[in-house]
Image (cartoon, rainbow, N blue to C red):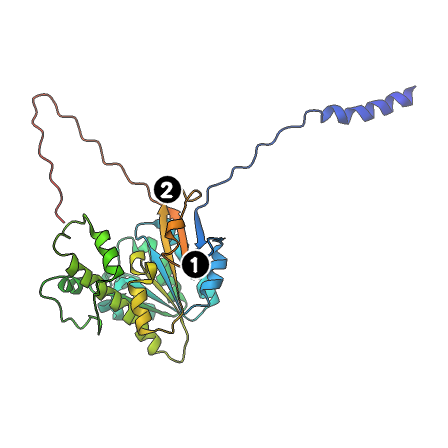
Amino acid sequence: MKPFFSVLVFTLLPTCCFANPPTTAAPETKPPAYRLIHSRTGKEMTLAQVADELAARDVVYFGELHDNVAGHQVYAELAKLLADRRPDFVLSMEMFERDVQGVVNDYLRGRIDEVAFLKHSRPWKDYARDYRPLVELTRERKLDVIAGNLPRPVAGKVASKDGSTSPFLPRATTAPLDRYWELFGEAMKGHPGADGAVERMYRAQCAKDDAMAEGIADYLATNPHRQPLVIHCNGNFHSDYGLGTAARLAQRAPLAQAAIVSMIAVPDVAKADVTNDRKRAHYLLIVTAPQKTPAPAKPPVKAGEKKLPETKPKG
């Protein structure tokens, strides 16, 4: 009987130990930081897949929302992937104006340091966070940056009744009252200072588009021995629907194969429905919209104390 008892204990113990196995919690699923959608098919793509397709183009537009940090980070990663696939590339930027091209060139070639570069190039706010990674990528690889935008004072003159004759103006510019004009009018509704001046402001907008397009076309024309990939960074209004800068470059370089990426900010990336946005660009980059900081609460008015009238800041 002794051997039988030993065997019985041996066979029962495992069953007792695992009669109630511990339950494991399901792993948490983090919401996506961003999504990339192929507009024509509606399919979701990885960053590497998008880079593979964009690398076959001549010009790629990074249409951005200037205040979206997450979107800038994705574009910086995408630029690295494109640089690996197309080592000969040039960065074109709305964020630098034509009159500082020499300063940009001096920095890229090591003739001045970054302190001098920032002092004289009038970088945009948050340059270090949003645009420095792109410029430094170009500098490390000893390539070029096109300072594409119209200088702000010149654009202001174009939008004035007097106009401008600046040498930094594009050689040719037009402001046709087309679909771009309609979208511009819609965007300017309620904009401070736009009343009665929308058409002049539109002329300045078109002059900026022509300047940026001319900068890219001239670079391609003066480097016929090369076939660089041009990455052009601009606010998405300048390239959405193939209008703005994209349309004006197509006029100047009709054989250049272009692709447009447009950044869209939504409250919830995972639940975003971009069906109505798929005509805006070849690819949609969906990112989280930044949370608006609530205005500070005003102190209550004490009894007997007069409430001061509210004043709005100028401009």
Q: Residue at the location (20% across, 52% down)?
A: 188
Q: Residue at the location (44% across, 64% down)?
A: 54
Task: Tell me where residue 68 appears, x and y as whole percent.
Answer: 33, 49
User: Is residue 73 visible from the viewing direction of this image?
Assistant: yes
Task: Tell me where residue 309 appears, x and y as whole percent.
Answer: 9, 34
Q: Amino acid at mark 2?
A: Pro
Residue 105, image quadrant = bottom left
Q: In the figure, 279 relative to 313: above or below?
A: below
Q: How would you rate the neighbour count of disc 1 (Cα within 10 Å): few for under 14, some for 14-19, many for 20 or more?
A: some
User: Is residue 110 visible from the viewing direction of this image?
Assistant: no
Disc 1 secondary structure class: helix
Image mark for residue 268 = none
Q: Earlier in the sequence, mark 1 or mark 2?
A: 1
The residue that label 2 is drawn on is 267
Q: In the figure, 30 relative to 299: above or below?
A: below
Task: Tell me where residue 25 appears, x and y as whole percent.
Answer: 57, 32
Front residue (pair 209, 250): 250
Q: Residue at the location (44% across, 43% down)?
A: 270
Front residue (pair 152, 181): 181
The residue that label 1 is drawn on is 78
Q: Residue at the location (7% across, 27% down)?
A: 306
Q: In the figure, 80 relative to 16: above or below?
A: below
